[in-house]
Amino acid sequence: MNARTVPLTLRQNRALAAIVQHRAMPIDVLADFLGCGSSHVYETAAALRRLGLARELTQLTAGPKWVVPTRSAVTRYFGQSLPDWTPSSLWSIRGRAAAEARVLLGATDFDAWTGERELSLERTDRGPYPYDGLMVRTSNPFALRTARGTASPVWAVRTDIARTSNPRQLAQALTRTVGQAEQDGCTSVLWVCTGAHRPETVYRTAEHIRSDLTLTATTPGELAGTHRRIRPVRDLPKGA
């Protein structure tokens, strides 16, 4: 059977979309993404392997193995051939954080999220995309509050995994993310702090950035509803 045309079940289709959009996904996060138990996610991963759409489960770091799409899977999803890509242990930190944030946001439907891999196809600049995903629909109450009555909110979601605080790098990352989010038609930037930078630091660093977007800096705990702060949303200084 041709891996690019073989029919898939709904769960297999959702799993394929997830691992291609995110480049790879740890099997435990994929189970959360699909809303199924461990036995079902392993069965799904095995089925994708048999169909030539996923590699053998890959150990990137200590912990659960990863489901990595084949080049045929990427071609099937995007409708065009792209260079083969192999995840590294260093990349896996960002990859897991981004996938976990998406699950917390409840943006697991096919059309709720556009990943950086797809967004990069329309970009001529080299280097990683400034943020992890463009989200147009979420079931997360915290994220919904950041929309502030916007008729059609569009979020640029960035996970910040910095191991040490670096004000200059943070300022550069914020500027690039906000600039790209404006080009992509977003209404808000959702900055998820999973590393050394805290939301308060993000807000202070963003004070010099002029934009009509809303910036929300948060933590996975806030997204999960296990920790709350008093002022989660701030407007960036309005652009000229």
Image: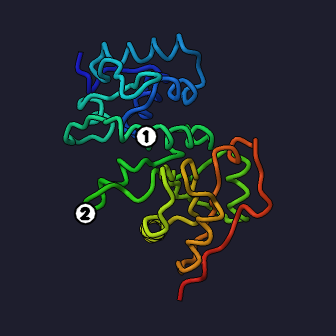
Q: Tag 1 or tag 2, which sits nearer the N-term?
A: 1
Q: Quadrant of residue 106?
A: top right
Q: Nearer the viewer, residue 111 or 221?
A: 221
Q: Is residue 226 left or right of residue 100?
A: right
Category of crowding for the residue at label 1, using alpha-carbon neighbours closer than 10 angstroms: few (below 14), some (14–19), many (at least 20): many
Foreground tag (2 vs 1)? 1
Residue for point 44% across, 44% down: 94
**Vertical comparison of 79 with 163: above or below:** above
Q: Position of residue 59 (x, y in %)?
A: 36, 23
Q: Quadrant of residue 210?
A: bottom right
Which residue was labeled with disc 2? 124
Q: Position of residue 49 (x, y in %)?
A: 32, 16
Which residue was labeled with disc 1? 95
Q: Position of residue 39 (x, y in %)?
A: 53, 10
Q: Amino acid at mark 1?
A: Gly
3D distance between C-alphas at marks 2 and 1: 22 Å
Residue for point 51% across, 51% down: 159
All told, the count of numbered labels is 2
